[in-house]
Image (tube, rainbow, N blue to C red):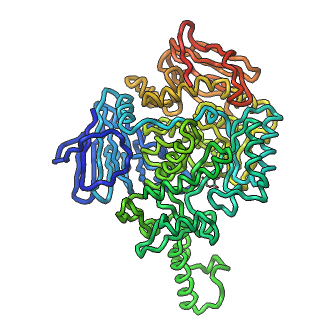
Amino acid sequence: MVEKYIFGSPFETEAVTACMEAVGFAGKVICGEISLEDGFCYSYQMDDADVIYGLGEANRGINKRGYKYVSNCTDDPNHTEDKISLYGAHNFLIISGKRQVGLFFDYPANMCFDIGYTRQDMLTVRCERADLYLYVITGESAYDVAKQFRKIIGKSYIAPKYAFGFGQSRWGYKTAEDIETVVKRYRDNQIPIDMVYLDIDYMQDYKDFTVNAERFPDFPQFVQKMKAEKIHLIPIIDAGVKIEDGYDIYEEGVEKGYFCKREDDSDFVAAVWPGWTHFPDMLNPDARAWFGGKYERLTSLGIDGFWNDMNEPSIFYSEEGIKALNQAIADYVKDTESDGDVMDNANTVPGEVRWLMEQLQNNPEDYRRFYHNINGKKVRHDYVHNLYGFNMTRAAGEALQKIAPDRKMLLFSRSSYIGMHRYGGIWTGDNQSWWSHILLNLKMMPSLNMCGFLYTGADLGGFGSNTTRDLVLRWLALGVFTPLMRNHTAIGTREQECYQFEHIEDFRHVVGVRYRLIPYLYSAYIKAAENDDLYFRPLGFDYPDDRRAVETEDQLMLGNEAMIAPVYTQNVSGRTVYLPEEMKFVKFMPDGSIYEETLSQGTHYVEIKLNEVPLFIRKGKCIPVVDAAENVDAIDLSTVRYLGYDGAAYEIVE
Ligand code: GLC
């Protein structure tokens, strides 16, 4: 059962698609208490056994207890354990214990979820203004609650099948030659691949929807050439539009009034990769349609996939921030009668100047400095901050549907809010080449699925920091199962394409396993999308009465047939795995054979070498497996055979 409560005058986020009558709250007890004295505060005293699921893209565990999280879409590339905000805002959680209750706080500004941080047994959810919708879902189990929630937020975006292939990316590929080298080395080494990503350097001076003509002398022809080699090029699109005379998108946006404005109606100016930019007003339907229409410039050249970035929106610094910094420096120079440049000597930079420098990026002040025009109403950005990335991707999604109604396109975003799952997927942003981030990747997946985001994945191998061969291999063995399987890394880091390491055959094999499983994985994905179901689930969703399963946070259920348990620690030859019931332990061996062993319910230590991919098949189930292929189109379904329990049936869908 789903109930909808209204508090104050909520902003219509369009997260929920189901039409439901909202009822006033009138002091009712909703599995907890609500206070409206100082903004909005929901509080609930947790039982020892309560598990709190949800929050989508958030730090820490599958069970969110024991920390606090703030929904405030933020570009922060350093995802250490203490971080409370990442790129997305997914305000849905499930209390699972004696009761099974889902809560969706539909509120697009900062919201704090204190889940046993201040007091270990208290869950509180707070926001500054009591203007929101609260959806309360009661069900038989956490799984049932999640599925009911999925029903009211609309169907998840479905990616094209090619997007289940493997993709290679690196911030630093600059020219057509760079891309061709990547493709050649993958093909020469017979490592399967379907996509190569174009990061910001393909653009002319980081201008959206432009292509650098020196680096790509004949881009349309290059796209076709890649297509002939079965490679989809996936360009990045950034939120900020470069301010540059003669750049038509900038000029049009200014003329039509489609950029976010300051209070005095001048266009707000912020620095991102291109230098000074304006932000298209993605919350203004006309501006959204206008910006979305620009994707056609690339689709008309044969491009059929995009990744939308910097759309929190990320702000490196604003004009106002720089002015304040300049002033502080000038004051300092005047006060100390110093004639030297304080910037030359870090030791002389006084506290205030240094503080201002540190505050330049993603400064909350800046997010209060600009406004949206939403159907004629001026809305200050910080009131709706968490909707920006959602609406940038919606701009693209709506436009792509018009441009090619019969064709699925790949689309995913960095920033998101619930509702965006109808238009595209997400990647989990700038992680690091750390072992702990394999586990973080795994833990985010089911939480994201609960919020509708099915096409998701992390930067495999790690984005920041230098990776190692074993880390890439182990991470790929998790990535084999995530819908988005992309190796991506930052400029200046160690090269981490699969062919950069010794014994390339191990990489060929691990990526090849992905292709052997695509008929299964894509089917599981389509079934989850069509039935408002989850592709990845915590074990507790399937085995709620088995406490050991509920507390297992390093394994996931996949589809209705499988369980994954990747290795995420260095220098080990296997791991301990908990089986809530008898299962078939399957290992894809480097010689192409498949090892199968039936394991009983309970705990097992299983050996998994660096070049083996483990998978577990549930009792009574089977999954299809085909021969490896060099790309998705080359998958030969006639090679299908079934792994798992004899007599089980499986239906492949596309
Ligand atoms: C951001 C993105 C990253 C990309 C980089 C350059 O940091 O998260 O994936 O490579 O910008 O565009």
- Residue 345 x/y as whole percent: 66, 79
Q: Residue furthest top?
A: 647
Q: Residue furthest left?
A: 26
**Residue at position x 54%, y 64% from top?**
315
Q: Give the left or right position of residue 464, taking residue 400 as reference.
A: right
Quick check: can you spot residue 524? yes
Which image quarter is the C terminus in?
top right
In this rendering, the answer to whether 82 lies above or below 240 is: above
Q: Give the left or right position of residue 577, taking residue 113 as reference.
A: right
**Residue at position x 53%, y 26% from top?**
524
Quick check: can you spot residue 82? no
**Residue at position x 75%, y 41% from top?**
226
Q: Residue furthest bottom?
A: 337
**Residue at position x 37%, y 47% from top?**
14
- Residue 356 x/y as whole percent: 52, 74
Give the image quadrant in which the ligand numbered 1 is located.
Answer: bottom right
Q: Give the left or right position of residue 63, taking residue 456 as reference.
A: left
In this rendering, the answer to whether 551 lies above or below 213 is: above
Which image quarter is the N terminus in?
top left
Q: Dividing the picture into quarters, in which one does residue 350 lie?
A: bottom right
- Given residues 394 and 187, the one toward you in this image is 394
- Residue 556 x/y as whole percent: 51, 29
- Residue 262 x/y as whole percent: 44, 72
- Given residues 441 and 3, the one toward you in this image is 3
Q: Dividing the picture into quarters, in which one does residue 614 lie?
A: top right
- Given residues 375 and 144, the one toward you in this image is 375
